Amino acid sequence: MSRLRVLREKRGFTQVKMQILTGIDQSDYSKIECGKRYCSFEQCRKIALALDTSMDYLAGLTNVEKPYPRAKDMD
């Protein structure tokens, strides 16, 4: 999950800011970021939205950081 930390730092976000943006407790987010805890589908979705990327990028399925075009009613 090193992509999480790299993207978070690239955006200038702290783990506390990620807590505010995603609703995931900072300590849980820290564990996800370090690979000590898995995130649920919904948590991954919230993280991808907060970091303006795709879930595929977070999962390492693509190297394209830019998110897919989103439907207007999905945010």
Image (cartoon, helix red, strand yellow):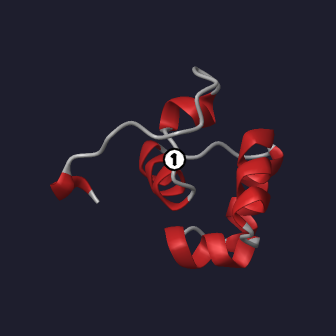
At numbered mark 1, what does the secondary structure look like: helix, strand or loop? helix
Residue occupying image coordinates x 58% and y 46%: 39
Q: In the picture provided, is 28 more to the left or to the right than 65?
A: right
Count of residue discs = 1
**In the figure, is residue 69 to the left or right of 6?**
left
Instruction: Kindly identify which residue carries mark 1.
Output: 44
Q: Amino acid at mark 1?
A: Cys
Q: Position of residue 75 (x, y in %)?
A: 29, 60
Q: Residue furthest top?
A: 61
Is 12 displayed left or right of 45 in the figure?
Answer: right
Quadrant of the rendered image containing residue 10: bottom right
Question: Which residue is at 52% across, 61% downward?
Answer: 50
Work out whether 22 lies above or below 42: below
Q: Which residue occupies 71% across, 51% down?
A: 7
Residue at position x 56%, y 79% from top?
20
Residue 19 pos. (x, y %): 61, 74
The residue lying toward the viewer, choosing from 66 and 49, is: 66
Residue at far left of view: 73
Q: Is residue 41 visible?
A: yes
Residue 40 pos. (x, y %): 50, 45
Of 21 and 36, nearer the camera is: 21
Q: Is residue 45 left or right of residue 29?
A: left
Q: Residues within 10 Å of mark 1 (few under 14, many from 20)?
A: some
The quarter in which the N terminus is drawn is top right
- Determine if residue 1 is in view: no
**Residue 49 at what x, y percent from top left?**
46, 55
